[in-house]
Image (cartoon, rainbow, N blue to C red):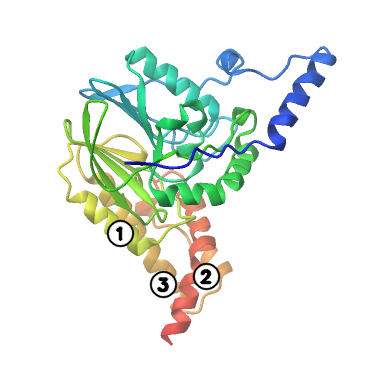
C-alpha cells in the first residue's frame, strides 16, 4: 500500500451557502440547520444496526429501493472487520451523516480505532461518508480515486437532488491511500484484495481470510437489478466468474441480503447475460431506443427490485454502444 496526495475536499459555494442559511435562520428566529451532533435528534437517523455475520465481521444492510428523501440514500451495504489492533471499514455510505453514524455504530461494538476505510468503487452511495473518517485511513484503487476526482462533484450534486437534507454538509473527499490487488495485513487482520472491473472501470472485492467473508461490492447484486451507468458487461461477467471460484463462506453483495453460497452471483450473471443479449439483438434488428425502452423485463426477473427502471436506464447507458457494434459488424 502506497501513500498518495492528501484527499481533495470539494468545498466551495455549498459550505458558504450553508453557513449563510444558518445565519439567516437565526436572524429570522427559525431553527438553524442541524449539526452532526444533533443529526439523530432532528429526524435524520439512519438507524444503523450492525449485524455480526462471522467472528469480528459486521454488516449494515441497506434497502434495495431507489434513492429518495425517505431513505436518505441508504440503499447500500457497508461493513467492518474488527482485528486485534484496529477496524477495517468496507465502504463509507452515501453521506456525511451516514459516515458519522457508522463511526458511532462501530464504537458501540469495539473501542479499537478505524485503521482503514476501503472504497470498493466510486459510486456515491459507497464513498460520500468518507468525510466522517480520518483522511489517512481512506483507501481505494487508483482507478477509483481517478473516477471520483473526475465525477465526484456531479455525483454529489445528484445525491443532494435525490435525497435532500440528508446530504447537508456532505463533501466529496478523495481516498488518500492507494490499494493494489493481493494480500494485505492490517489491524491484526489478513485480507485478500481483488482488483476487478465491469460495474465500473475499477471495482474492488475484499476477502477476509480468517472467516471466508467476501465483500463483493457492486460486482454482485441480490434481489435487486444491477445498475449500469459505468458498466462493461463482458468484463463484469468475467469478474463474476472469478468471484465464484473463491473459497468464501459468506458473501456480502453491494446491494441485497448476505448469502452463504453463490446464488447472488448466479442471479447477477443471469440478469447481465439477458441484458447483453437483449441489447445486442435489438441493435442487430435495427430497433431504435424508443422501441427498446418499451420492452418488458422477463417474469423471471420480476422479483428484482428496480428491474423495470434499471432496464430502461441500462438502455440509455448502453444501447448506443450496442448500435455502433451492430453497424460495424454489417
Q: Nearer the viewer, residue 141 or 305?
A: 141
Mark 1: secondary structure: helix
Quarter of the figure that contains the N terminus: top left
Q: Quadrant of residue 161?
A: top right
What residue appears at the point 51 percent right and 35 percent down from the top-left corner? 128
The residue identified by callout 2 is 320
212 on left or right of 234: left
> Which numbered disc flags the more N-terminal residue, 2 or 1?
1
Going by the picture, which residue comes out furthest to the right? 28
| Within-10-Å neighbours for mark 3: few <14, some 14–19, many 20+ | some
* Figure check: 315 above or below 10: below
> Which numbered disc flags the more N-terminal residue, 3 or 2?
3
Going by the picture, which residue comes out furthest to the bottom? 330
Mark 3: secondary structure: helix
The span from disc 3 to disc 2 (Cα, nearest Å) is: 10 Å
Q: Position of residue 74 (x, y in %)?
A: 48, 32
Amino acid at each position: 500500500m502506497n501513500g498518495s496526495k492528501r484527499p481533495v475536499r470539494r468545498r466551495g459555494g455549498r459550505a458558504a451557502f450553508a453557513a449563510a442559511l444558518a445565519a439567516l435562520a437565526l436572524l429570522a428566529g427559525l431553527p438553524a440547520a442541524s449539526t452532526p451532533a444533533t443529526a439523530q435528534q432532528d429526524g435524520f437517523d439512519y438507524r444503523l444496526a450492525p449485524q455480526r455475520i462471522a467472528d469480528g465481521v459486521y454488516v449494515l444492510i441497506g434497502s434495495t429501493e431507489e434513492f429518495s428523501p425517505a431513505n436518505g440514500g441508504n440503499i447500500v451495504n457497508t461493513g467492518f472487520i474488527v482485528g486485534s489492533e484496529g477496524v477495517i471499514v468496507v465502504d463509507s455510505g452515501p453521506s456525511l451523516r451516514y459516515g458519522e453514524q457508522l463511526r458511532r455504530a462501530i464504537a458501540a461494538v469495539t473501542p479499537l480505532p478505524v485503521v482503514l476505510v476501503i472504497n470498493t468503487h466510486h459510486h456515491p452511495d459507497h464513498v460520500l461518508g468518507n468525510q466522517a473518517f480520518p483522511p489517512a485511513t481512506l483507501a481505494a484503487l487508483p482507478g477509483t480515486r481517478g473516477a471520483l476526482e473526475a465525477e465526484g462533484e456531479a455525483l454529489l450534486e445528484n445525491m443532494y437532488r435525490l435525497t435532500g437534507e440528508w446530504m447537508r454538509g456532505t463533501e466529496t473527499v478523495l481516498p488518500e491511500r492507494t490499494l493494489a490487488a493481493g494480500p494485505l495485513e492490517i489491524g491484526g487482520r489478513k485480507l485478500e484484495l481483488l482488483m476487478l472491473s465491469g460495474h465500473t472501470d475499477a471495482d474492488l472485492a475484499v476477502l477476509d481470510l480468517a472467516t471466508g467473508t467476501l465483500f463483493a461490492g457492486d460486482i454482485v447484486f441480490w434481489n435487486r437489478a444491477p445498475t449500469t451507468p459505468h458498466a462493461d458487461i463482458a468484463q463484469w461477467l468475467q469478474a463474476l466468474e472469478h468471484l465464484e471460484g473463491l473459497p468464501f463462506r459468506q458473501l456480502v453483495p453491494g446491494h441485497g441480503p448476505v448469502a452463504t453460497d453463490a446464488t447472488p452471483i448466479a442471479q447477477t450473471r443471469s440478469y447481465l447475460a439477458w441484458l447483453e443479449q437483449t441489447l445486442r439483438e435489438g441493435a442487430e434488428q435495427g430497433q431504435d431506443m424508443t422501441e427498446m425502452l418499451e420492452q418488458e423485463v422477463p417474469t423471471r426477473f420480476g422479483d428484482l427490485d428496480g428491474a423495470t427502471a434499471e432496464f430502461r436506464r441500462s438502455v440509455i447507458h448502453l444501447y448506443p454502444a450496442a448500435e455502433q457494434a451492430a453497424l460495424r459488424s454489417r
